[in-house]
Amino acid sequence: MARELFRLDPRTTLLLVAVLNVVMFSAGFAAGAGVARMIFMTIPTVLAVGLGRWLAALGYTTLVWLAFSFETWSLDVWWLGGLNLILAGLASLVARLAPGIFMAYIAVISIRVGELMAGLAAIHLPRLVIIPAAVILRFLPTVREESASVQTAMSARGLSLTRVGPLAWLEYRLIPLIMSTLRCGEELSQAALTRGLGRPVRTHRIARIGMRPVDVLTLGAMVTGIGVWIVG
Amino acid sequence: MSDSAVRLSGVSFSYSGVESDSLAKLELSLRPGEFVVLAGPSGSGKTTLTRLINGLIPHYYEGSLLGQVVVDGIDPSANALWRLPVGSVFQNPRAQFFTTDTTSEIAFGVENLGLPTAEILSRVEEAISAMGLADLRDRSVFALSGGEKQRVACASVAAVRPAIYVLDEPSANLDLESTRQLREIMAGWKAGGATVVVAEHRLGFLRDLADRVLLFADGQLRTEFSGADFRSLNDEQLHQLGLRSAWGETMTATQGPPGGDCFEITGLRCRHRSTHAPGLSAPRPEDAVHVDHLRIPKGKVTVLVGANGSGKTTLATWLGGLRRDREGRLNDGRRNWNTAERRRRVFLVLQDVNHQLFTESVAEEIALSARLAGPTGLPILSEAEIMERLDLVAVADRHPMSLSTGQKQRVAVATALASGREVVVLDEPTAGLDLHHMNAVADALRVLADSGRTVLVATHDIELVAACADLVIRLDHGILTPV
């Protein structure tokens, strides 16, 4: 399957999330730093397209390049005065935050829970870290599913923002969601406990992890970006 | 080894915060290899007994436990939960998966045993082939049907090779075909010599497997039947015991095309819709529907039957105005209802009733619907009258979330009645309900129809059909077929 080619090893993904954020927030305005940022801005676009998320990739890429261009350009043009400062600050914030957020989104949609557990175990993290991390990753799609169901149920009952007011709307939206998510959480813990989670043995996980061409390419791009940043 | 798989002597248990005993003075011994069915109404103590065997009591649920429990020679109270050789399958297939893809899920329990990778893989393969799951390998669990999820859950448990299997209402959300597949899996466990304990309301598929049937009521073991004695009971005798039918698995209620005033659906085409499943590329399909012509009589209860995946839910959500498929018309005899109008005039009760109760009391829930009600040509009942007719007066001040599933369904019907909408569509309103609650829901549907509402119920509960249907229609792979 073509999309499988673009799924990174979970460790590469997590490293990328971390390094990308460091670059975005530390890189200044020198020429090398700008190129480094462009490289790291582009990696999530390529990964998202590879995973088949065309629309998300298009939206992210447009937004981040607009913001980045404005941030860079506005340094030279001061004719807007005070407004310029505000806009430039805003653009800078978007240009530096968006890649990290989008990369986190890619991590959530591409890492499987089994792979995450295998990957984190392979770098010898304690179970105290692995299990909560796995539970969070497992739970995000459930929250999204439950949230969509509550939204559907509200539409069916005719509970729209305009008819019930913002406070009541928020209450109706959140309370059933919290209730059902809590219940799912309880059932999930029970199922996991009865299936031996917590047995004090060293576990082997069968999820296949390891370096593949896409990991090598990604790491290569990361090294290049950091190299340009340091040299430039 | 001990001579009984499970032994309980003088066991009473009450959950913390609850005064009455959920199980009282239970004496019970299960032989190794025995297939035992726990029957009885909701709240009778069946589920509590399953939790005593799989160790969730006292390791997850706190409370006061008296007497002695021994599971395969081990006292669950004095040992960590993972020492018990018990595999558990639960009611809700959605919430018992720890991972997000099927193969990892089947491996999860075996991985936790700490076995080497090769052994894990061979056990996973064994479970996959023993249960015929080859086509479900490496799929996203979010893209599976309820029946497929339950088979994966069974495989995951079986790969650990437990001596005892405990299942708590495993068929509650399954259609007939999936239930039959579940039966085959359990028959395999029985043939392999495992002890199997199943708490269930639906008894038909367990009838021939049961070595013993234990009947619970109010936390007490009331009676027990040998398998042969149980099989000699007819449906009438089962109903007198408060149990669901064990025989009626074929549809009988059929009638000719309806006369009188009808809603008409014509030329409806709903296409498969798919959304991305997280972490995997497999799409989650929404079932297609292809209905050329369908008449739904006004003021009657029409039951729509069909397997999971036959398009019942798609049709229900289209009727409720929650899908925008352009092709297809709903005509009330004078004019067509467009999407916005369907959304305003059709009341939809969705599959998981928990998502659609929003307020802090039953009375408030009904008042909310009444407040939002638009103009209607139908008789308007007062809120008090609605509660009276749906037997909700006693729980008027209770929080909807504190009610039983059957009561919640009746509250949902009450909100439908208060909304004044002319058409009420319900999706699987009796999943997992016992005989008493199923009958109460059937009565509630009759109340709707008697108040002039047109009712359409999508279900695979054959007994609900017998209890309330004026007309039965069947959907098969999205196409209407004769019943």
Image (tube, coloured by chain):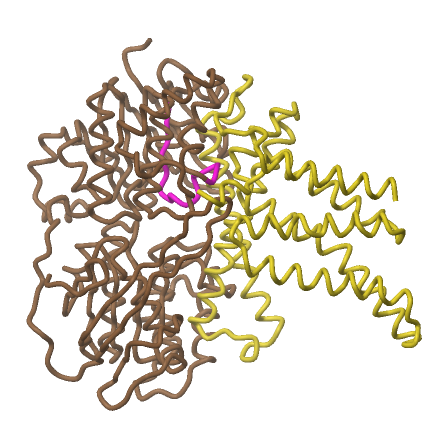
Chain colours: A yellow, B brown
Rendered image quadrant of residue B311 = bottom left
Q: Residue furthest top?
A: B1
Q: Quadrant of the N terminus of chain A?
A: top left
**Residue beneath the point at 36% across and 46% down:** B144
> Where does the image place residue B72, in percent across and percent down from the top left?
35, 16
Q: Which of B141 and A68 is in front in this view?
A: A68
Q: Can residue B367 be seen in this view?
A: no
The image shows residue A160 at horizontal and vertical percentages of 52, 75
Can you tell which quarter of the image residue B461 is in?
bottom left
- Of residue A175 and residue A207, the one placed in the foreground of this image is A207
Question: Residue at coordinates 79% horizontally, 44% vertically from top-left?
Answer: A22
At 52% from the left edge and 39% from the top edge, which residue is drawn?
A112
Residue B129 position (above or below residue A67): above
Q: Position of residue B194 (x, y in %)?
A: 26, 21
| Residue A102 percent across, percent down from the top left | 65, 53
Tell me what residue is drawn at x 15 percent, y 49 percent: B239
Q: In this view, does B204 lie to the left or right of B347?
A: left
Compared with A53, A164 (above or below) is below
Which residues fall within the magenta stretch?
Answer: B86-100
Q: Is residue A219 left or right of residue B8?
A: right
Judge by depth and name the residue closer to the eye, B463 or B124: B124
Q: How many numbered callouts?
A: 0
Give yes or no for residue B88 being in the magenta stretch.
yes
B109 sits to left or right of B211: right
Q: Which residue lies furthest to the bottom in this view?
A: B334
Q: Is residue A66 visible?
A: yes
Question: Seen in the image, is B17 located left or right of residue B175?
Answer: right
**Residue A80 drawn in magenta:** no
Q: In which quarter of the image is residue B290?
A: bottom left
Q: In which quarter of the image is the C terminus of chain A?
A: top right
